[in-house]
Amino acid sequence: MKTKTDTEKSASTEEKIKEAARRVFTQKGYAATRTRDIAEESGYNLALINYYFRSKEKLFDIVMLEQLQIFVHSIAGLLNDRETTLPKKIELLVSHYIDMLIANPGLPFFILNEAYAGPEKLFEKVGAGVAGQDLYIRKQWLEFATAHKMNTINPIHLFMNLMSMTVFPFIASPILRNKTNMSTDAFNALMVERKKLIPAWIDAMMQMPVKQSAPPKIPKSKQKGETK
Amino acid sequence: MKTKTDTEKSASTEEKIKEAARRVFTQKGYAATRTRDIAEESGYNLALINYYFRSKEKLFDIVMLEQLQIFVHSIAGLLNDRETTLPKKIELLVSHYIDMLIANPGLPFFILNEAYAGPEKLFEKVGAGVAGQDLYIRKQWLEFATAHKMNTINPIHLFMNLMSMTVFPFIASPILRNKTNMSTDAFNALMVERKKLIPAWIDAMMQMPVKQSAPPKIPKSKQKGETK
DNA sequence: AAAATCATTAATCATCTGATTAAATTGTTT
DNA sequence: AAACAATTTAATCAGATGATTAATGATTTT
């Protein structure tokens, strides 16, 4: 019979190693992370890392998937909710994302790194529940698009814009902050501002008249100065 | 006296190693790249990599800076041009960026990786000429903002949006393409569409009435939840 | 063509790194 | 407390990796 103390203690150091691993991985990326870094960060012996998790890669997978699933679960419900209107969903989604990203600014870069290193691993394990094809918000989005005569423009553009304006600033924040001498607090304040702004911008884009049919060809002489 | 053949031949293999290095670095990132990968990719012996460049890191710096400076120079002139109007500049900038990114989709990730690994190296060497503080477009932007009563909203938001909507899709394209089963060609076509769309969106944002003046102070109790 | 310089290669070194092992320590059960 | 199992550690291994070296080939200079 397994005693409580036993498992509890194991879980404790196991958890501490995972947390240390999460910190180091998120900061340095998988390739640049040494198992010794994790050992040191956790305060435990190097061998324990292989005792609890079989390898560096397995530890990475576990940490990674946990981190992602926390977030995925936190928004899956919202996306599939049938009561909330689309604009409200967008507002909540942006707000939720920004909160998460302020608390965990390294995650996007982390995810990108993995997506670039080996796409399969991530998508198959995490992406399952939030594939997008069967989410209710997708139906809402498409309905709205057709209702507003937006057939001419691919709805994916607006989705791209939503994600871009929300996530990209966090990804680029090291560069941005360096160029503008901005503190982390100031940056975060900007991002909180965006909780209101982004939904408004997206809304404006959705309402935007698509001046598509109008000028297929402009007789302007010097229209395109340099296409290169 | 140095003979032509000499330098030409040297430059040739030196250049080939750099190109191989660029390919491998861009694809795998600095930490995951092995000098042997570069040697193999270039077709030359491993030792030549240290013969021409003193170390892996120096080779990386050189390749990296070259790549960046090509792009920086290609837009610096545009940004400082005093004739082109702001909307036209935006249009040209987006177009230029998207062309560059289609030709070189790995670059943003590459830059991010370095920005996260060691910020100083990049900014000091490359960022010098395009610091942003002294670019004419900045003046134009600020003038436009004040002229249109946009003082209430930080102009940096619109700059963020411009960069986000242009660059982020490329960064996230591995994920996006995987989720939507999109081919590279289809993705690129989308991006070319955005050459027209993004300037229009930005324009709409700039014209947008800022419904700001309303609540300057909110008696909300839980205003600052967690500054951390 | 001999000498000298440059380019290239195979072999090797020293270190780093992920993983394993065997012993020591701690905790639990009988 | 003896026996047993779980946890932790120090030491070590095997392979990877960045770099160097010494020898060979090629090209230029004298």
Image (tube, coloured by chain):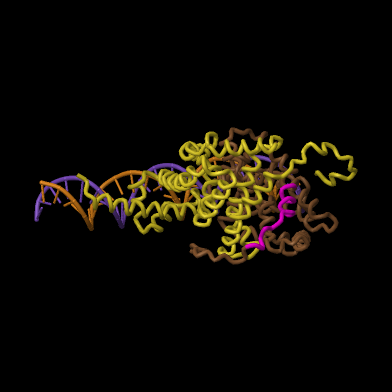
Chain colours: A yellow, B brown, C orange, D purple
Residue A208 appearing in the image: yes
Residue B178, horizontal then vertical, whole percent: 57, 36
Residue displayed at 62% across by 36% down: A143
* Left or right: A40, with A82 as reference point: left
Look at the image and say whether residue B213 sits in the magenta stretch.
yes
For this rendering, which residue is in front, A77 or B43?
A77
- Span shown in magenta: B200-214
Closest to the observer, B155 or A17: B155
Q: Which percent across, then down, holds residue A122?
A: 49, 40
Q: Is residue A124 above or below residue A16?
A: above
Question: Which residue is found at the position 78% from the left and 47% from the top?
Answer: B4
Q: Where does the image place residue B56, in percent across and percent down from the top left?
A: 58, 51
Q: Is residue A188 above or below residue D27?
A: below
Tell me what residue is drawn at x 39 percent, y 51 percent: A18
Vertical order, B128 against A222 (above or below): below
- Which of the 4 image quarters holds residue B215? bottom right
